[in-house]
Amino acid sequence: MKKLILSAAIVLGSLSTYAAILPITIEVVKTATIQEEYTEVKLEEVPVAITNALKVAYPNAVLDKAYINAKKEYKLDVTVGDKIGNLFADESGKWIQK
C-alpha cells in the first residue's frame, strides 16, 4: 500500500513539472488621426460644377452647409430625405472618397 501511494505521489509530482508559464506580451498600438482644417463658405460661393454634380448624383439632396480646405476640396453637409451626411468633392465637381 505504501508503494502504491508513493508511486501515485511520484506520478502526480512529475505531471506538475511540465506546467510552463507563458510570457505575457503587451502590444501598444498607436493611432494618429489627422483632422483637416475646413472653413465654412457661403452656399453662393460653392462652384457651379459641384452644385451640378450634386444635382446629378443626388437629385433630392439639399445642400445645408459647405466648407473648403487649403487643397480646394469641399466638404458638403447635405440632407436627403431624413438622412444627413457629408460629401467631399474637388473644385471641378469630382467626388472624393474620405
Image (cartoon, helix red, strand yellow):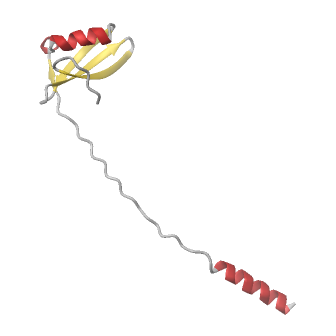
Which residue is nearer to you in this view: 2 or 50? 50
Q: Position of residue 90 (x, y in %)?
A: 19, 22
Residue 5 appears left or right of 21: right
**Above-or-below relation of 78 to 22:** above
**Above-or-below relation of 80 to 32:** above
Counting labels gives 0
Q: Position of residue 95 (x, y in %)?
A: 26, 21
Residue found at the far bottom of this picture? 2
Which residue is nearer to you in this view: 52 or 43? 52
Which residue is nearer to you in this view: 57 or 16? 57
Q: Position of residue 97 (x, y in %)?
A: 29, 28
**Residue occupying image coordinates x 26% and y 25%:** 96
Residue 4 sits in which quadrant?
Answer: bottom right
Residue found at the far right of this picture? 1
Residue 51 sits in which quadrant?
Answer: top left
**Residue occupying image coordinates x 31% and y 48%:** 31
Location of the C terminus by quadrant is top left
**Residue occupying image coordinates x 84% and y 92%:** 2
Q: Position of residue 75 (x, y in %)?
A: 22, 23
**Residue occupying image coordinates x 16% and y 23%:** 40
**Above-or-below relation of 32 to 56:** below
Location of the N terminus by quadrant is bottom right
